[in-house]
Amino acid sequence: MKVLIVGSGGREHMLVKTLSTSKRVKEIFVAPGNGGIEDEATTVNIREDDLESLVEFAKSNEIDWTIVGPEIPLAQGIVNRFRQENLLIFGPTQEAARIESSKDFAKGLMKKHQIPTARYETFTDSEKAKAYVKEQGVPIVIKADGLAAGKGVVVATEESVALGAIEDMLDGNRFGAAGARVVIEEFLDGEEFSLFAFVNGEHVYPMIPARDFKRAFENDEGPNTGGMGAYAPVSDLEPSKIEETIKHVLEPTAKAMVDEGVPFTGILYAGLIETKQGVKVIEFNARFGDPETQVVLPLLENDLIDVIEKVSNGEDPNLQWKDACAVGVVVASSGYPGAYEKDVELPPLPSSATCYVTHAGTKKASTQTYASTGGRVLLVGSIQDSYENAQKEINHYLSSFDVSENFFYRNDIGPRR
């Protein structure tokens, strides 16, 4: 088989690594890919949002399956275009991808179909939004309605921060059209976790839960990021809570999408929180999450291409998981998620029998070296019999990585002791 992966981040690099183990996959193309992916697959110089060029590439290269990593091409309708050309592609249609591309749509769906989530209101007028914040009090959560690359959420513990976020989005046009509407939610207190599922219509096949770390710095301090690391499975999550999530969140959401005439096929990602009132939804994504993918997929025993085919055909993939623990730590550019330097050469990356590395924001600087192109640069992961042993292997790897003033990472990724 020939497979095309669309995207350029760590999630796509992990898809490459996972599909490379399949006996059925003979060639992997990635558009546009990154420096690390270039070592393991054929990168193609086509942007992820250039849908027509991607269609033409898939046709002319006789691609058997296309797998979409990021949210933007899904929101633009890449699945619709590929299906028009009778090309096999795994992901939701543009209409179904609204579960991620519009928080207002997702919240409305949950409210209508009684899927547990935070109370909310939606605003386009900043004065009305500010009045609502003053009435509700803090802590409170301000979200840009549309796609903002993981940066459109502000958890405000001070009123001035909440009001400033509203001004930024509605008056300052910080996120353009994505922030022309804001969703304001009650703050939910509890432990967060993520649960992915392969979905086709009302058929839901859950993966193992993961927990990611959104704050930039240790002890969950600093600004929200796209994720500074993750681990899987989540040992402190009771099996009954996972069952509750499947029964009251994932399955009803899949059914709700069918009932609304926008059936979902692909990866449904639920960002969740365990509250005193039960598990509630923070957000939905319409694709694999990053960095959770980098700790979930390494634990999957099945051949991923088999799973995708079976799910697409309405068959149970019978997911099997390794009895092990995976931890992944993100190395980020200093200044991230704010301003940071690009084109900074990375220290040499040692080879390791106990750790794996996925590239997110890198390009080749030479045959042996890489330079940074983004905020999140790498993820170093390890699969071991315990979280402690995985953390120990990662710490050993990163100690030889010689992180300078140009890069940083968190030392506390893993279960809280």
Image: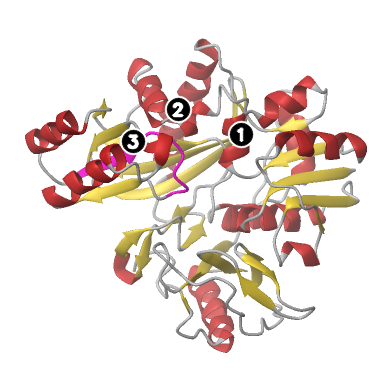
Residue 178 at what x, y percent from top left? Answer: 42, 36
The residue lying toward the viewer, choosing from 60 and 377, is 60
Asked if the residues shown at circle 3 and circle 2 are in contact, with their CB atoms under 8 angstroms apart, the answer is: no
Instruction: Give the residue drawn at x 55%, y 81%.
Output: 398
Q: Which mark is residue 280?
A: 3
Amino acid type, residue under disc 2 in the picture = Lys
Residue at mark 3 to residue at mark 1: CA–CA distance: 25 Å
Residue located at (52% from left, 23% from top) = 254
Q: Looking at the image, which residue is at 82% across and 23% down?
A: 85
Q: Is mark 1 on a helix, strand or loop?
A: helix
Q: Which of marks 3 and 2 is nearer the N terminus?
A: 2
The mark nearer the N terminus, 2 or 1, is 1
Residue at mark 1: 74
Residue type at mark 1?
A: Leu
- Horizontal side, residue 278 vs residue 238: left or right: left
Residue farthest toward the left in the current orientation of the protein: 135
**Which label's residue is closer to the chain start, 3 or 1?**
1
**Height in image: 102 above or below 415?**
above
Question: Which residue in the protein does label 2 denote?
Answer: 247
Say above or below: 389 vs 323. below
Q: Are marks 3 and 1 in contact (CB under 8 Å)?
A: no
Indicate yes or no whether the magenta region holds residue 375.
no
Residue 386: image x %, image y %?
Answer: 53, 69
Quarter residue 363 falls in: bottom right
Q: Give the range drawn in magenta.
A: 140-150
Residue 286 place in picture, x, y as percent: 55, 35
Which one is closest to the eye, mark 2 or mark 1? 1
